[in-house]
Amino acid sequence: MRVTTFNANGLRSAAAKGFFAWWRKLDAELLCLQETRASTAEVEALVTHHLPGYRVFHRPAETRTGYSGVAIACRREPDRVIGELGWPEFDREGRYLELCFGALRVISLYLPSGSSSPERQAFKFQVMHFLESVWSEWLASGRPMIVAGDLNIVRGPKDIRNFRANQKHSGCLPEERAWLNARIEEGWIDTYRALRPEGEEYTWWSQRGQARSKDVGWRIDYQLVSPKLSGRLLDCSIAPRELRFSDHAPYTVDYRDDG
């Protein structure tokens, strides 16, 4: 089973830059998208046109048009689709979508960035606090789960080019890193770090200056899995940064099929 997660920073824009043509060649089962910045009708039209044979499920933002939004494209029909976690202020921003395939749960998750204002950073901290119990409940369920998405947080020095210089910047704040690493300590598995213990690859680059060409990046896009999937990790890859579909790079994980 092959799963890709990708923050498109506008799905229409990513499609125009060749993302779907590139992704089709991966022959993957699931595509988790964040920041679609499109209506459900637009997302469905794009997937229908570019990915024949796939269904797509979309959770748009209700707060304003052209903002946020998460989706999952899949070959197999899910048993259940869940688009809310029960906190309206979070749910209305279109940041969570879960598909159930038998015992397997696949989630596309998009945490807010706090870089635009102190108010948004405060909201990010609220979201992190809210999600603590959610993550714990997911883990306690004992189900095989894949939580894929843009978490807007790095874990440590290997996940960002200029670690020391970014200690006071959103996404690398000590409180944020401690929160994310606590999820790992709790039992969640960072697939990239499990498969690439010494890896120093990135999934996002600032659009300022020449950050991407110089590979001054951050690893903020993840597939975190529950312990049930720990023995099924085969390989992973971050798309070459030269493929400028977005300011993010798609991240793909291969899982061994279960029997």
Image (cartoon, rainbow, N blue to C red):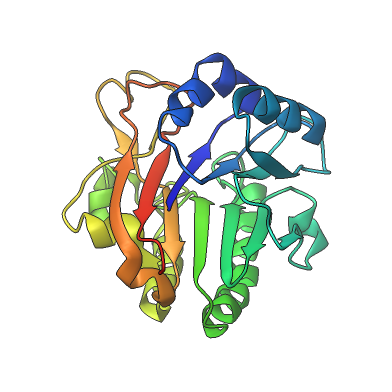
| Number of on-image labels | 0
Residue positioned 44% across, 66% down in the render: 225
**Left or right of 159: which side holds 12?**
right
**Left or right of 98: which side holds 161?**
left
- Residue 69 seen in the figure: no
The x and y percentages for residue 86 are: 79, 68
Residue extending furthest front?
A: 259
Question: Which part of the image, by quadrant, shows the C terminus?
Answer: bottom left
**Left or right of 182: which side holds 141?**
right
- Residue 124 seen in the figure: yes
Q: Tell me which corner region of the image, top left, top right, bottom left or bottom right, holds residue 33.
A: top right
Query: Quick one: 123 or 242, which is closer to the camera?
Result: 242
The x and y percentages for residue 222 are: 43, 52
Query: Quick one: 222 or 117, which is closer to the camera?
Result: 222
Query: Quick one: 145 or 175, which is closer to the camera?
Result: 145
The x and y percentages for residue 249 are: 41, 34
Residue extending furthest left?
A: 198
